[in-house]
Image (tube, rainbow, N blue to C red):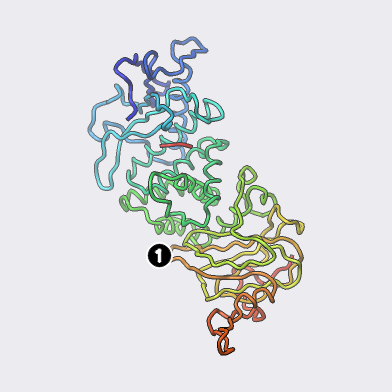
Amino acid sequence: MYAFDATDVVQSWDEPTGVVRVHFSVDGPNVTKLFDGDADGVPDFAQDVAITAAAALAAYADAGFLPPLSEADLGLSDLGGSGAFDFYLVDFGGDADGNFGVDRCSGTPQRCSGYMVMENDFRGYGYPDLHEAVTVLTSHELFHAVQSAYAADEPVWFSEGTAVWAERFFEPNVEDFVWFAQAYLDDTSRAIDRPPGGPVPAFAYATALFWDFLTLRHDPSLIVALLEATEADGAEFPMPLVEAALVEYGDTLRDAWFDFATMNLATGDRAGAATAQYPYAAELDGITAEAEGAGIDDDNRFYPLAATYYRIDHAGGPLAFGIEAPAPELVFALHPVQGGAEDGPVEDAVVTFDGAATGVVGELPAGAYWLLGTYPAIGDQSAKRRFCLGTEAFVDACFAPADTGETGAEDPGGCACDSSSAQFPLLGLAALVLAARRRR
């Protein structure tokens, strides 16, 4: 879709290591930025693309990733005139800013060689500066080339998410990653491996936050292991491969997911007080409460590997929880806002319990609290549950049997949760503690 015109005057330049060759137009419809500050006869923009791309490939190689396949690896001649990885700078007309193109695929799973087509001048694009645009595009699209050296048909939530992760791996301060991380926080109640349908959505890119969490928790070799798993298992990339990889690292998906959901709470205005936080937590806008108030009464559908958040204003004293039917697969955690404030940095959880619990959480000081609810496991079915959090009277009223209005008899329906029956199996606590852009 994006290529040089017959009237373009095309030149090429090889960066010093010979790993990358960049092709660019010096006259014609796709003419690139021609500024040549060092007067060496090559546009500085084209050199920046090639040198940055070579640096990204070196960083991936140092981390243990396979290099992109060459044309020769799949029996092709050197289509760009050399064995180097080819970049072509053409005008995308604002429709996109770059993409990894495929030359040939073969084998099972399909492994592909290819090239990079990239915007020729970035005029009218929203990047902070030209070099950041180059950094984002080269690191992102080259990681697609790396992925294709393992298996070319990974699901989009993995391929695009890890490509955005690679942006931050290569350049930790890149703004594009933060933007997509926030896009995930805007939709945490969606199962991470079930992005919206249709054209590739922002959510697929936004899963980068999860992959970055896992590498912060372990190290980038975990992403190498996941790519190796896709090569061994073919194009399918079910979440069980993630689960199996975590076991090899002495971890579990349940523990990792719960901690991921917890760290996502401590972002934006809620960053600064919890023990575990992203290094960029304060740069994010953070999550939004599904509901908030003096009491929470919500009928929510909890999806596997998703999380929902609520904020409650507690007047002090006993705080109770009730749920219409036991759901032990769900996990809840209650996090106080630091200093008893209305909102702000959240502290570590004062209590964690599963969805089979009903009863009094504890005698808690007055202030705002955030409730995290999550389904930290792989599952085929969601869990739809009505639950309530508030005073004992509030929770009792939530599930009080309703009067039919005919005989005076009460309708036995509802869970009839009794907030006075303090049944709170704790997960990992010894006692109830008083004291929780446009890319192709």
- In this view, the residue in front, 225 or 351, is 351
Give the percent coordinates (x, y) of residue 326. 52, 75
Amino acid at dot 1: Asp
- In this view, the residue in front, 60 or 147, is 147
The residue at which mark 1 appears reads as 380
Give me the residue at 52% from left, 49% from top.
184
Image side of residue 334 versus residue 20, left or right: right
- Counting every numbered tag in the picture gives 1
Answer with the quarter of the image where residue 96 lies: top left
Give the percent coordinates (x, y) of residue 15. 42, 21
Image side of residue 78 versus residue 437, left or right: left
Q: Residue furthest front?
A: 406
Q: Is residue 207 above or below residue 93?
A: below
Specify few, some or many for label 1: CA neighbours under 10 Å numbering under 14, 14-19, or 20 or more.
few
Q: Is residue 120 above or below residue 291?
A: above
- In this view, the residue in front, 247 or 10, is 10
Give me the residue at 35% from left, 28% from top.
85
Q: Is residue 76 above or below residue 421?
A: above
Give the percent coordinates (x, y) of residue 294. 70, 65
Q: Which quarter of the figure is the N terminus placed in?
A: top left
Give me the residue at 64% from left, 47% from top.
268
Give the percent coordinates (x, y) of residue 99. 38, 34
Q: Secondary structure at mark 1?
A: loop
Give me the residue at 58% from left, 53% from top.
264
Answer with the quarter of the image where residue 31 lies: top left
Answer with the quarter of the image where residue 77 lies: top left
Q: Which quarter of the figure is the C terminus placed in?
A: top left
